[in-house]
Image: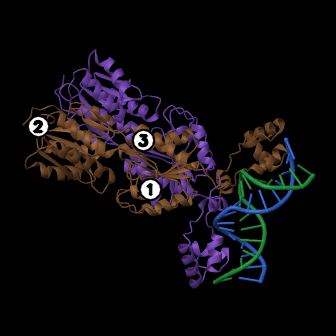
Chain colours: A brown, B purple, C green, D blue
Amino acid sequence: VARERSITIKHIAAEAGVSVGTASNALAGRPTVAPELRARVVEAARRMNYRPNSVAANLRRHNSRTVGLCIPALNNPFFCDLMQRLVGLAEEDGYEVLVLETREDGRDEAKKLETLYSNRVRGVFMVPTAVWKGERDSNIPMIVVDRIRPEEGLPSVALDNHAAGVAAFEALYDLGHRSIWMAVNSRKIWNSRQRAEGFLAAAKRLRAKDARVLEVGMTPQQTAITLGGALTTSPPTAIVTGSGIATLGTLRALQDHGLSTPADVSVLGFDDVPWMDVLRPSISVVAQPIEEIGRRAWKLMLAAFEGKSRPEHVLLEAKIIHRESTRRIGDH
Amino acid sequence: VARERSITIKHIAAEAGVSVGTASNALAGRPTVAPELRARVVEAARRMNYRPNSVAANLRRHNSRTVGLCIPALNNPFFCDLMQRLVGLAEEDGYEVLVLETREDGRDEAKKLETLYSNRVRGVFMVPTAVWKGERDSNIPMIVVDRIRPEEGLPSVALDNHAAGVAAFEALYDLGHRSIWMAVNSRKIWNSRQRAEGFLAAAKRLRAKDARVLEVGMTPQQTAITLGGALTTSPPTAIVTGSGIATLGTLRALQDHGLSTPADVSVLGFDDVPWMDVLRPSISVVAQPIEEIGRRAWKLMLAAFEGKSRPEHVLLEAKIIHRESTRRIGDH
DNA sequence: TTGTAGGCGTTATCAC
DNA sequence: GTGATAACGCCTACAA
């Protein structure tokens, strides 16, 4: 593909009547260049519409201002929010973000990661799928986000999912519920498992009558079907979900079975997205501090760039937001 | 930042006992190299964990496999869907996607575009903000998506917004409504304006009693406030919105004013997102063919790469999906 | 079929 | 302070 060659620093050096070295120094704002020359160079660059070639600069410097972002599902609102934060932070500091969708099935995850490395990204934000085997380039910083995989020993930031599971159970227990289910996508996913374990731990400690965890699959449709099957016997008085997707599916399943919320079944969703507030009833949720997750992740990334990276695991607290979908009931 | 230098094609050439030229040819799969040598080279690369440096290759070839994507709001579900499609298509063809958030206010839009160009992206998908002045590099293909700006003469793909506005009005008119409002974010945005114009054209043609367009702002909150103010006088029997955001805000405004849907006011939303189906009542919508938008946009991009790019404007049809939020009423 | 060498646009290291 | 010049890692004529 022959494309018209763009104008280079050589051209503007010639135009300004200086050497390329000086032109480079001037453009980079290095202090070693006389004000008059600098002005000439900058002016020439402006006039000729010079666009620095950072590909060449990166090659020469062994360095780049691009970070990669591996997301399992780009249409998931939680990940979108996260991505927005991360992209915003990166842009503020002059970095670009190369976005990859790894799909939950992890197909091609490793290969796609390779393309990031081929492009010599400076670092990678990784939301690992359940099947990721940890393949990576140990020379390039990787920050694990949202899902912690302790075995890799990588710095990471995520919700304290166990605590969130505990908090979710307690919130419903405090409302008088004793028969509570949790609907998670898949226990293969680290955070779902943690949330489930926290939930069950709290249930055991508080001696709940009926507390169980259901694996409902990765889509709202699957969730509705799986959960729907379980609901035919003896439904609980409350359901807490393990994700936005599971929340959607749970609401559908309840509707399908003519169970009303919160009269028959209280629902405590996971992840606060705008429509939780618009649904009737509005949905109570376990909310993640997405903004802080992004901030801490970016901070870890910058630390890794500086070389002062320790495998630090940042755990953040969830917040329970009470709305209309959870109601207090009398003891049974 | 001194990072450990990675292993290059020279190393694997040495390891395989061939010249760099041969190594390059072998790795690139060019047919001019003897099977035996090729095997040696490939094996050496595998053994040494060779990661081709596409930065260097791109510099040498004046070429890259990266495209840019400029999105006004990364947390907008419609754009997320679009991005997912585009990223998926690009990945299938071996391209990476550099994602940029331009914000609706267009602040730094031009500057951010410059960074894409500095990174020598092969092409750019642009969802222009209202304030974009058309600055771009004419040597690098740009495909305008979702919002058409005819004055730039760029290839573009978007919904036929005028027709969608007409269809929305007609759908409600056919249900017997004669007093219909449309809530759009801002007429400064091309597609909102087009939808509004189509809506008004249909209203005029069908001689609706009360048909007006309200500009309600860029957030659900603003929408709820602005629309709320208008609702205090004499509410219409139906409202069609011009975006997912406006839909959210409209539902809130109606709830705030104790107006029920569809008993008091029918609501026809814009953009089909999963929760439209879960809300009670479920929300009828004007749905965009996002998948096809993505496909056509990528096709235009590939055509532009081939140099056979004409400023083609692809207009796609919306589909009205009837759910519970729109109901038939008798003539007044 | 294979090897050699020049150059892509930049930055960094030197002399001057 | 400024200007040659040598890399950076790769591709591709072109020569062998």
Q: Nearer the viewer, residue B40 or A317?
A: A317
- In percent of width and height, residue A134 lies at 43, 61
Q: Secondary structure at mark 1?
A: loop
Q: Residues within 10 Å of mark 1 (few under 14, many from 20)?
A: few
Under mark 2, the amino acid is Asp
> Counting residues from the N terminus, which is met first, the one under dot 1 or under dot 2?
1
Q: Secondary structure at mark 3?
A: helix
Query: Mark 3 sits on what residue?
Result: A293
Which labelled disc corresponds to residue A153? 1
Query: Mark 2 sits on what residue?
Result: A264
User: Would residue B134 be visible to someone looking at this image?
Assistant: no
Q: Secondary structure at mark 2?
A: loop
Label 1 in the same subunit as label 2: yes
Q: Quadrant of residue B206?
A: top left
**Real-space Cα separation, disc 1 to disc 3, in angstroms:** 19 Å
**Real-space Cα separation, disc 3 to disc 2, in angstroms:** 35 Å
Q: Is residue B172 left or right of residue A108?
A: left
Q: Nearer the viewer, residue A185 or B268?
A: A185
Which residue shows up at 26% across the image and 16% down it?
B234
- In percent of width and height, residue A7 lies at 72, 50
Q: Chain of mark 1?
A: A
Which labelled disc corresponds to residue A15? none
> Counting residues from the N terminus, which is met first, the one under dot 3 or under dot 2?
2
**Real-space Cα separation, disc 1 to disc 2, in angstroms:** 45 Å
Which residue shows up at 50% across the image and 43% down it?
A298
Under mark 1, the amino acid is Gly
Q: Nearer the viewer, residue A282 or B195?
A: A282
Q: Chain of mark 3?
A: A
Q: Is residue A56 left or right of residue A96?
A: right
- In percent of width and height, residue B229 lies at 33, 17
Label 1 in the same subunit as label 3: yes
